[in-house]
Amino acid sequence: MNNYLSQPILITGIERSGSSIIAKLIKSCKIHAGSVNEMGENLTIKRLVSNYYTSVLKVPENGQKPLPNVSALNLDIDWEKAIGSLLIQEGYKGDRPWMYKSFRIAQTWPIWASIYPDAKWVIVRRKTPDIIQSCLKTAFMNAYTDKEGWLDWVHQHENLFIDIIKSNANYIEIWPERMAIGDYSQIYEMLEWLGLEWNDSILTLTRPLFKNSLKNKM
């Protein structure tokens, strides 16, 4: 088995930023994602992390209020072995890149940076007012009921992104909303950086996603 197992693509961002679109786009490039939910998150790894949220960190698994205290995280947690076993059970042979997408990656970033120092981080961004507007009209985003509450929540995540960048993580920032106006330049750059190839199915995949998500729900 080559070193792909220790070099995941970690896709993260603030919820309602378009990270699911980016995850589906990357997944279409024939990398290993495993069994994923409608948001593009690997279900078995999600269960592992969600259980850590509720049983150890004592915070809601939805990651809304409160966020985990990153300064109190246990960096000796043995997720690398557990996740490796889960991937192998899914049939992963380590012969191609694998990805995991979750907003929880940013919220617990020191753990991921510790167990995967060679990971490539895809940080998905969106304008703050657009995130807030999306949160206010999305039913499952229910931690706050006003703009001020969501603004503070967004700022907490932005500070996490700054910390990730300062940690010397190997990262790239992506703004999916640019694709909605036909600008795919960042996507070309991202795929080249990830060692993946553009394929025309990306256009077929993303156009309806933007029509139904960025314009109507997000």
Image (tube, rainbow, N blue to C red):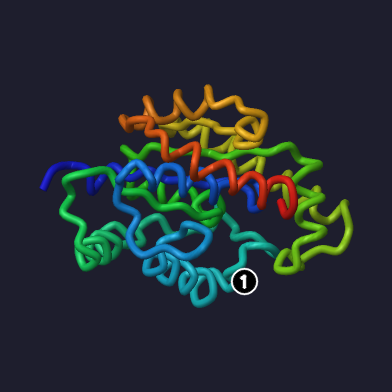
Q: Please identify the residue farthest to the left as the structure is shown.
A: 1
Is residue 66 found left or right of 204 in the rendered image? right
Q: Residue at x 26, y 61 (%)?
A: 87
Q: Residue at x 60, y 32 (%)?
A: 179
Q: Nearer the viewer, residue 100 or 206?
A: 206
Q: Residue at x 33, y 30 (%)?
A: 197
Q: Secondary structure at mark 1?
A: loop
What is the total number of numbered labels drawn onto the structure image? 1
Q: Please identify the residue farthest to the bottom as the structure is shown.
A: 55
| Coordinates of residue 54 in the picture (x, y in percent) | 54, 75
Which three-letter amino acid code belongs to the residue tagged 1?
Pro
| Coordinates of residue 211 in the picture (x, y in percent) | 66, 46
> In this picture, is 184 found above or below 80?
above
Q: Nearer the viewer, residue 77 or 10?
A: 10
Report if residue 71 is visible in the image. Answer: no
Report if residue 49 is visible in the image. Answer: yes
| Coordinates of residue 164 in the picture (x, y in percent) | 52, 38
> In this picture, is 14 found above or below 123?
below
- Packing grade of label 1 (10 A; few <14, some 14-19, many >=20) is some
Q: Nearer the viewer, residue 59 or 18?
A: 18
| Coordinates of residue 42 in the picture (x, y in percent) | 40, 62
> In this picture, is 186 found above or below 21?
above
- The residue wearing badge 1 is 60
